Each structure stands twice: as structure tokens, then as C-alpha cells.
């Protein structure tokens, strides 16, 4: 018998706290969502393949209990299915023991009893899913779906363990082309293309984003400066950084406008009048850091990249009568004023 619900669990998420919380809640959850089975997925790839196989076998509802990487895997597995198949599914989120970025975007309650009521009712609303196409770390092209958002830039490289070179180097400008609009040239410490409001590990970076409006929000952090870089390196500065919405569009193309990192810097004289060359390895490390690319907190590769959104692509389980605040929306590809980071615009 095929279970109607598959719980995709990463017991190692949140340093093992998810697994310990699951042990305490297991009987209660399985009883509320019966008939249900549990898939242990210790990495996004396992969640990806397991969710896809289960959907093809007839499972109708998927409950993610883990980190952002677990949800990332489930979404990519289900997005490989035909649209006619996906529209009959439902993806829900179980906060054990912490609310995920997507659960926060949905305004999901923290109470386990209330979460189980919502999941059991199975009411769904079609939500947008982002898509990114780029080059992986081996130089091979890839494409990936994302639920929360995607990020790029020196801070992304640092978050993924790529070193501090990009934080100290002079900012390298990014060329951003919005669908149906002109291009902008931006120096950024961190750029994010958001579907939802929250990004893993960074909090509410796009509070105005609506995951059902078919629009992506480009959010950025200007170059850090010395003291902000020190704060980020110490692990205390990321929450205090100011995020600014720069553009809203149905798609973006982002390129790194920098020279060849393998070319040495122009020769110059040192203090003794002797000629010396710049360090190509420093330039290369800065370019690598500035081009770092991730999605839903998972390192994917590097720029250039192309982003798009599939509107109402995935049914998400929500409360039957969610309380929503309707905000006035900008038309797609309308730029939000940003005197601090936008340094150049070209019309197309």
C-alpha cells in the first residue's frame, strides 16, 4: 500500500536537534498524518531522488522536516515531474525544532498541534518556484530550482567556506539585466534573487516579497568596508547588515564584469624604485569569491547565471484561511530607487 504522505526527514539538520525533536514527536506525527512513511534524507540529493520516486509511486503529500537543503532537494525532485502531476501534490513543512525559512515566509505557527492540523487538512495554494542556470565548480553547466532564493557574491563565498579574500578585495561590479528592461552595473558584497521573504541563515532579507505573484526580487548589500567585513568574519555582522531591494522582475541575468583573473596586474614600482608586478593569485581569488553562487543555502557554482520564476508551479500546504497583508506591488522589471549601489544604467 502506497502511503498518502511521505515525511522527508534529515535527522542531522540543525546539528542533530531535528533528529532529537523527531524522536520526541514521532508517534504523534505519524498518528496525525497516517498513513505516512518516513524517508531519511541526510543530504539534498537523497531528498531529491526519494521525493521524485515517491511521487511517481503515488504519494500525494510531502512533509519536509529538516533544513533548507532538505526542502531544496524535495522541490527539485518534484519539479522534474510533469505539471499535470505536480498540481495534484502538496508540499508542507514541519518545524522540528525550529521554523525553516520557508515556514517563516508562510507564517506557519510554531505549535506542533497546529502544524499537524494544517498538514492533515491538506489545503494547498500554488506557489512560485525560482530557477537558476549557471556553471558548477567543475565548469559544467547546470540548472536548479530554488524555493527561498539564490545568492551570489563575496559574502556567499565566505558563508560557504570560501575564505575571506573577497571581503577585503575592492568590490567587483556585477552586470544585471532584468527581463524586459535595461541593465544596471552594481558593486555588491552580496546579491540575492528572492522568491520568499527569508533566506537561510540571513533572516528576512526581502520582507516585501510575495511567493505567489510571479515576480523575483533582487536584493543587495553594498560593499562592506573594513569594519563590516570584520563583523562578518567574526560571525556577528550578517544579521545587522542592511538589505536593499534593487529590482523586481520575472527574470535576471547576472554577470561578473571583471578582467581575466589569470592576467597579472600592471607592473608598478615599489618604494625602492624597482619594478614589481601585481599578484595574479589575489585577483583570481577576488574574482572567484565575487562570482560564488548558491541557492537555498547550497553552494552550486559561479557566475554568470540566469534566473527565472515559474509562477504557481508547486502546491504548498498552508492554513485554510491564511491571514495575508496585501501590499501594493511594483510592475515587473521596475527598478526601486537605490542611490547607494546603482552606479550605472544602460537602456536596451
Image: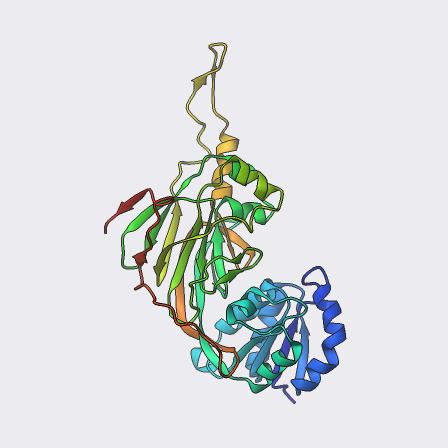
Residue at the far left: name it.
348
* Residue at (38, 41) in percent of width and height: 257
Residue 227 percent coordinates (x, y): 54, 37
Which of the 4 quarters of the picture holds residue 92?
A: bottom right
* Residue at (46, 35) in percent of width and height: 170
Q: Nearer the viewer, residue 200 or 80?
A: 200
Residue 214 percent coordinates (x, y): 38, 69
Q: Is residue 163 visible?
A: no
Instruction: Classify the position of the N terminus by image quarter.
Output: bottom right
Identify whether 94 is placed above or below 337. Answer: below
Figure coloring:
rainbow
Residue at the far bottom: name it.
1
31 horizontally vs 223: left or right:
right
5 horizontally vs 245: left or right:
right
Q: Nearer the viewer, residue 177 or 204?
A: 204
Q: Is residue 85 visible?
A: yes
Residue 129 percent coordinates (x, y): 45, 68
Marks counted in the figure total 0
Residue 160 percent coordinates (x, y): 58, 49
Residue at the far top: name it.
272
Which of the 4 quarters of the picture holds residue 212?
A: bottom left
106 horizontally vs 116: left or right:
left
Identify whether 298 is placed above or below 163. Answer: below
Amino acid at each position: 500500500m502506497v502511503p498518502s504522505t511521505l515525511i522527508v526527514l534529515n535527522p542531522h539538520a540543525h546539528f542533530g536537534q531535528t533528529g532529537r525533536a523527531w524522536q520526541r514527536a514521532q508517534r504523534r506525527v505519524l498518528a496525525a498524518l497516517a498513513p505516512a512513511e518516513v524517508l531519511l534524507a541526510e543530504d539534498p540529493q537523497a531528498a531529491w531522488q526519494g521525493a521524485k520516486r515517491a511521487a511517481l509511486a503515488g504519494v500525494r503529500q510531502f512533509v519536509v522536516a529538516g533544513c533548507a537543503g532538505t526542502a531544496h532537494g524535495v522541490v527539485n525532485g518534484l519539479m522534474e515531474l510533469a505539471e499535470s502531476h505536480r498540481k495534484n501534490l502538496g508540499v508542507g513543512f514541519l518545524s522540528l525544532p525550529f521554523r525553516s525559512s520557508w515556514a517563516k515566509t508562510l507564517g506557519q505557527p510554531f505549535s506542533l498541534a497546529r502544524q499537524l492540523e494544517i498538514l492533515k487538512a491538506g489545503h494547498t495554494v500554488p506557489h512560485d518556484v525560482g530557477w537558476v542556470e549557471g556553471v558548477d565548480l567543475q565548469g559544467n553547466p547546470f540548472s536548479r530550482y530554488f524555493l527561498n532564493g539564490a545568492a551570489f557574491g563575496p559574502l556567499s563565498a565566505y558563508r560557504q567556506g570560501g575564505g575571506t579574500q573577497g571581503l577585503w578585495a575592492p568590490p567587483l561590479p556585477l552586470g544585471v539585466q532584468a527581463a524586459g528592461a535595461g541593465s544596471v552595473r552594481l558593486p555588491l558584497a552580496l546579491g540575492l534573487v528572492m522568491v520568499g521573504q527569508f533566506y537561510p541563515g540571513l533572516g528576512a532579507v526581502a520582507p516585501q516579497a510575495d511567493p505567489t505573484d510571479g515576480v523575483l526580487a533582487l536584493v543587495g548589500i553594498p560593499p562592506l568596508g573594513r569594519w563590516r567585513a570584520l563583523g562578518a568574519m567574526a560571525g556577528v555582522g550578517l544579521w545587522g547588515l542592511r538589505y536593499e531591494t534593487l529590482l523586481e522582475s520575472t527574470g535576471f541575468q547576472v554577470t561578473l564584469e571583471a578582467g581575466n583573473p589569470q592576467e597579472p596586474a600592471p607592473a608598478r614600482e615599489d618604494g625602492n624604485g624597482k619594478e614589481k608586478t601585481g599578484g595574479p593569485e589575489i585577483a583570481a581569488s577576488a574574482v572567484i569569491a565575487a562570482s560564488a553562487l548558491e541557492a537555498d543555502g547550497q553552494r552550486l557554482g559561479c557566475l554568470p547565471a540566469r534566473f527565472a520564476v515559474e509562477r504557481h508551479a508547486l502546491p504548498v500546504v498552508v492554513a485554510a484561511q491564511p491571514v495575508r497583508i496585501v501590499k501594493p506591488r511594483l510592475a515587473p522589471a521596475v527598478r526601486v530607487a537605490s542611490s547607494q549601489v546603482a552606479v550605472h544604467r544602460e537602456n536596451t
